[in-house]
Image: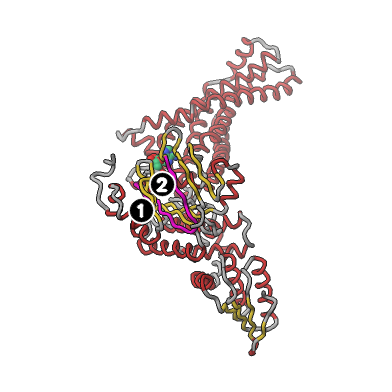
Amino acid sequence: MKSPIIKVRDLKAGYGETVILEEITFDIHPGEILVVVGGSGCGKSTLLRHLVGLQPPLSGSISYWGRDITRMEEDELGRLLHRVGLSFQGGALFNSMTVGENVALPLEEYGIGDREQRRILARMKLNLVGLGDQGRRYPEELSGGMKKRVGFARAIAADPEVVFFDEPSAGLDPVIGAGLDQVILELRRLMDLTMVVVTHELYSIRTVADRILMLDGGKIIFIGTLEEAESSDHPRVRQFFLRQPDRGIGNRE
Amino acid sequence: MTNSVRLESGGSVIVPIRKPLTDELGRTLLRDVGEMISRGNREIRIDLAGLEELDSPGCAWLIRAVRAGKAAGAEVKLVGAAGRPAELLELMRPNFEPLPPPSPRPGFLERMGDRGLTVWEEFRQALGLVVDALYWSFIAPLEGKGVRWKGLLDEIQAMGSSAIGIVCLINFLLGLVIAMLSAAQLRLFGMEILVASGVVIGFARELAAVMTGIVVSARTGAAVTAELATMKVSEEIDALKGMGLSVSRFLVAPKILAILVSMPILTILGFLSGVAGGFALGIFSLGFTFERWWWQTHQAVSMGDISQGLVKSVFFALIIVLVGCHNGLRVRGGASEVGKATTRAVVMDIFLIIVADMVFATIFYYTT
Ligand SMILES: Nc1ncnc2c1ncn2[C@@H]1O[C@H](COP(=O)(O)OP(=O)(O)OP(=O)(O)O)[C@@H](O)[C@H]1O
Ligand SMILES: [Mg+2]
C-alpha cells in the first residue's frame, strides 16, 4: 500500500475551553473512501474543519504528504488547499454569484484555463450532480438539496486530490442520494480521488465506504472496513449498524 | 500529435492524439480543427486510441473541439477511446450538447413597465408595513396586547443612550462653527451679541432636529436595516412568520416605541449642546459675560421654537425606523444584498428627512 496522504496524530480539538475531540489518530490512504460516522453533535464537522486547517487544533498534528499543516504559514496552507476540496454541510454558496460562477470560482482563482474552458468545466461538474441546466440561476432560487449538490460540484471543480464531503446526501431524496454515491465512486475510479465523507445513511456507507471511522464521546471508537464494523462487538458500533434504537435520544452515557 | 494529420478517402481527416491532452495540446487541437474546417473538411475524427489518461481539462478541450465543429456545420467525432478515458467521456456525454442561448433581454418599454410595477409594488409593501407597525405600536397595546418590554429597553439602550455622546459632540461643534460664521458677519455692524439669538433659534427650530436625525439614521437606521436583512437572509423572519407570529409586533413595534422615546431626548440634548457651542464662542472668544449671553439667548427663544424642533424629531424618528425596517425586510438573496439594503436605507433616510424638513419649514412659514 502506498504511504498515507494524510496522517492525523493525537489530535485534540475543541472550541476555546471545551474539548470536543481527543486522542484522534488515523491515516488516510490515497484513493480510499473513508466514511466518518457518529451521533449528531459528536464532532464530525469539527473534525473536517480541523483537517482542512480552518481551525487550529488544541494539540497534535495533521500532515498532508508529510507536511504538518498545523505549523504552516497561511499562504503555504493556501497553496496546499488548492489540491483539496471541501463541501460544507449547508452548501455555503456565494449568493451574489450564479451557480455556474460559484462552481467556476476555484478554477478562476487557481488560474485554470480560459473563460470558455472554465465555463465548460463548471458545466461538466454540474452535470455530474444533475444540475447541468441550472448554471445561470442564483443560489436563492434553488432548493436546499440543490444547493448542497452545487456545493458538491464546487468542491470537485478544480479536480482536487482529496475531497471532504460533509453529509453530501443528507436531505436529498433517495434516488439523487444514491446518484451522488455513484458519482463518488466514479470520481474515485476515473480520477483516483481520495475522499472523506461524513454521512448517516447506512445505504451510502455500504455503497461507498472502503473504511469507516466512528466517533463517539470525543474519541475514535472504531476504524476499519464494513465487514469488521458489522462483526464488531463494541455496543455503540453494533447499535449503529444493526439500527437498535436508543431508549430516548440523549440518554447517551 | 495533432500536426501529423492523415487524410482519408472521402475528404475526412483523422487527427491522432498520442500524448496526454495538456492545455497546450488542447489549444493546438482546437486551432487545427478550426483550420481543417475552414479548408472545407466536413468530417474530422479525433483518434484517441493512443490516449492513456484523460483529466477533466483534457475532456473540456475535446468538448470544445466537438462543439466548434458543430457550430461550423462540420462533424467532429471522437473515436478509438478505451479504458478510463472512454468511461470519462461517456460520463461527460451530456456536456457535448451546446448550452441553450440565454433568454433575450426585455425591450425598453417592457423594462420601463417592470420598473413602474416594482416601484408600485414597493410602495404597497411600505404602506402595509407602516399600517401594521403603527397598529402594533400604538393601538394593540391599548387593546391589551402586550408590548415586549424587554426588547423595548434593549432598543432604547442601543438607539438612545449609546448615541448621546456622538449627538452632543456633533451638535456642539456645529454650534461653534455657526457662531464663528455669523460672528464674522455681525462684527461688521458691531452686533456680535446677536450671534446668541441666531444660534439658539437655529438649533431650536432646525439644526438640532436635522443633525440628530442624520446621526441617528447613520447609526440606528443602518443597524436596523442590517439586523432585519440578516434575519431575512438567514430565514429567521420566515421562522417567525411560520410560527404564526407578527414580524411587526416582534421586531418593528419595539423599535418604533424605542426611537419615539429616544429621538426627542437626543434632540433636546443636541439642542443644548449646540447652544453650548455658541456660549463657548461668545464667552471665550467674543468676550461677553455669561449673564449677558444667557439673557440674550433666553429672550430670543420661545417654547414654540423648541416644540417645532421636537415635532420634527418625532417624524424623523418614524422615518428612520420605518425606512430601516422596510429596506431590511424586502431583502432577498445573500450577504451582498444586506450591504446594498443598508446603503439604500441610509440614503433614503437622509433624503426623506430633508424632504420632511422642507415640508415643515413651508408649513411653519405660512402659519406663524
Ligand atoms: N463554533 C462553536 N463553538 C462552540 N462549540 C461548537 C461550535 N461549533 C460546534 N460546537 C460544538 O461542537 C460539538 C460538535 O459539533 P459538530 O458540528 O462537529 O457536530 P457534528 O458531528 O458535525 O454533528 P451533525 O451530525 O449534527 O452535523 C457540538 O457539541 C457543538 O455544540
Ligand atoms: Mg456536522
Name of the residue lying farthest toward the bottom: B10
In three-dimensional space, the C-alpha distance between marks 2 and 1, rounded to whole angstroms, equals 11 Å
For residue A38: magenta?
yes
* Total number of numbered discs in the rendering: 2
B13 shown above or below A16? below
For residue B152: magenta?
no
What chain letter is assigned to the residue under label 2?
A
Q: Which quadrant: the C terminus of chain A? A: top left
Judging by the rendered image, the residue that carries numbered circle 1 is: A200
Q: Magenta stretch? A: A23-39
The reply, left or right, for residue B194 in relation to residue A245 is right
Residue type indicated by callout 2: Lys
Judging by the rendered image, the residue that carries numbered circle 2 is: A44
Q: At 56% across and 69% down in the image, what residue appears?
A: B101
Instruction: Decide which of B289, A103 is in the foreground and name it.
Output: A103
Q: Secondary structure at mark 1?
A: loop
The reply, left or right, for residue A117 in relation to residue A35 is right
- The answer to whether residue A108 shows anywhere in this view is yes
Tell me, yes or no, whether the two marked residues, 2 and 1, touch with CB atoms within 8 Å: no
Residue type indicated by callout 1: His
What chain letter is assigned to the residue under label 1?
A
Q: Is mark 1 within 8 Å of ligand 1?
A: yes
Q: Secondary structure at mark 2?
A: helix
Name of the residue lying farthest toward the left: A247
Q: Quadrant of ligand 1?
A: top left
Chief SS of the magenta region: strand
- The answer to whether residue B248 shows anywhere in this view is no
Q: Position of residue A71 (x, y in %)?
A: 56, 40
Q: Is mark 2 within 8 Å of ligand 1?
A: yes
Q: Position of residue B56 (x, y in %)?
A: 56, 65
Q: At 28% across and 51% down in the image, what residue appears?
A: A238
Q: At 56% across and 43% down in the image, what residue appears?
A: B343
